[in-house]
Every structure is written in C-alpha cells, then in structure tokens.
Image (tube, grey):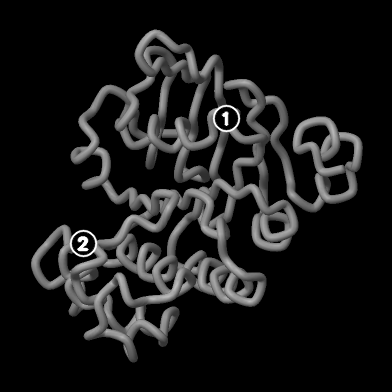
Amino acid sequence: MGNSDFTLKIDDIHTFIGQFHILEGVSLEVPDGSITVMLGRNGAGKTTTLKSILGLTPPSKGRIIFNGAEIQGQLAHQIASKGIGYVPEHRAIFRDLTVEENLKIAERKKGDLARRSDFIFGIFPDLKRLIKLQGGNLSGGQQQMLAIARALVPDNRLLLIDEPSEGLAPVIIEQVMEAVRQLSAHTTVLLVEQNFIMASQLADRYTIIEAGQSVRSGLMADLVDDQETIRRYLGAT
C-alpha cells in the first residue's frame, strides 16, 4: 500500500464539534514501532485529534490511514476492533471494580487477559500485587498504570495515550515513562503530553498542534535544541 512503514497517517483532517471548527488541517505520521508525541498548548486540538482517529469526533474532511487502510467514517467500535487502544485523560477506570475486574472488562475477545497477563504484569508488577483492590483505592499513579494496562488487554497495534503525566508526582511520572518505554517494544504509541521534559525523554518524533493545525513535525532530538520553536509554540518560558 506504500504505507507499510507507518502504523498511522493522518492527512489534513478537519473536525467540527457542534458548530465549532476545532481541527482545521491536522496531518501527522506515526512510524511503526515509534513513540510519537503531540505537543501544543491547552485547547490546541490534541485530544480532539485522538478522538478523531477513534471516530469519537469523526472528521468531516481528510483521511486517516491505519495499517494501510482508510478508517475515517467508520464507527468507533469498528475502529477500535482493528487494533487501536485508547487511554483517555483523567484515568478513566471503574473505581468500584477491582484491578482484575477493570482488566477483565477491557477484553475484546474472551481470554485476552489470560493470554496477555504475563506481558501486562511484566510492565506493571504493582498491579499484580493489587489485583483484588478496588480501583478507587489505588493511588493516582497506580490508577494511571491501570488505565494504560486496560488498553493492553486486547492485542492492540497502536496505543493512543492522552496526558499520562497529568497530576502525578515526578517520581511516579518516571515510572509511567518507563512503562510506556517498555510497551513501545511491542506496540506503536501516539502520546499527548503537556510535560515537555517527559515528552522529550520518551518520544522519537513530535508533531506540534497550534490552533487546530499541525505546524511542525520531526525528530524529537532536533526539537530539543530548537529553543525558538519551543518558546513560540509551547510557551516554555
């Protein structure tokens, strides 16, 4: 298909929420096996881009190509079933269910958890220890790890992770980063992250979103040295 080097390609998508034109031309590429981060100020359109990929806020224009096939216009559950996992911001877990129940409910096919448990608990050993604890009794960091682990229960080829470091202490952020690093050996990752230091240490590539448009993309190693671009788009003063 000519897209085999990329798990995901987005080509000039436009997305409306109600009458609001939120995305006004976002393009990005996520190479196979990479960690790619979307950067930008609050309200730039990063979360809407993730939701557009998933069909939760379907784009009205443009193309989204996953594994060489166009997926825009399909229903969210159809898109997910192709192998895309989503970790929304604010750690969307079931607080009244145990860790084990939270993982079980994320199965796409019966037996997913049993097949994947060694892999999941290899990355998140804490969760194995806390398996019978209710989600609401976990710390913020443990809840974030559970939210990511839930997306690993089905065999996903691409993981979309929204703001994993939000509200977490620095030592916990380190643990979450290490987990994302480990799982990227098995699956491609597209990340939204406000914490530039975390993003710069984790991601291979970046795309900057500004006012609903993708304005810069490239290798993270090049961006780290580009103070002018960082100041201009990320307001890191």
Question: Which residue is pictured at 74% across the width and 50% down the height?
Answer: 220
Q: Quarter holding the C terminus? A: top right
Horizontal and vertical percent position of residue 180: 52, 66
Question: Which residue is pictured at 26% across the width and 39% down the height?
Answer: 79
Contact (Cβ within 8 Å) of mark 2 with mark 1: no
Horizontal and vertical percent position of residue 166: 56, 56
Mark 2: few, some, or many residues within 10 Å (few <14, many ≥20)?
A: some
Between the residue at mark 2 and the residue at mark 1, the CA separation in whole angstroms equals 29 Å
User: Relative to 154, is 196 on the left or the right?
Assistant: right
Question: Which residue is pictured at 33% across the width and 65% down the height?
Answer: 152
Q: Which residue is mark 2?
A: 106
Question: Tag 1's secondary structure?
Answer: loop
User: Relative to 178, is 107 on the left or the right?
Assistant: left
Of 79 and 150, nearer the camera is 150
Horizontal and vertical percent position of residue 121: 36, 83
- Residue 231's quadrant in the figure? top right
Image mark for residue 43? 1
Of 35 and 213, nearer the camera is 213
User: Relative to 47, is 59 on the left or the right?
Assistant: left
Q: Is residue 125 above or below residue 94?
A: below
Of 222 and 101, nearer the camera is 101
Question: Which residue is pictured at 24% across the width and 62% down the height?
Answer: 94
Q: Amino acid at mark 1?
A: Gly
Mark 1: few, some, or many residues within 10 Å (few <14, many ≥20)?
A: few
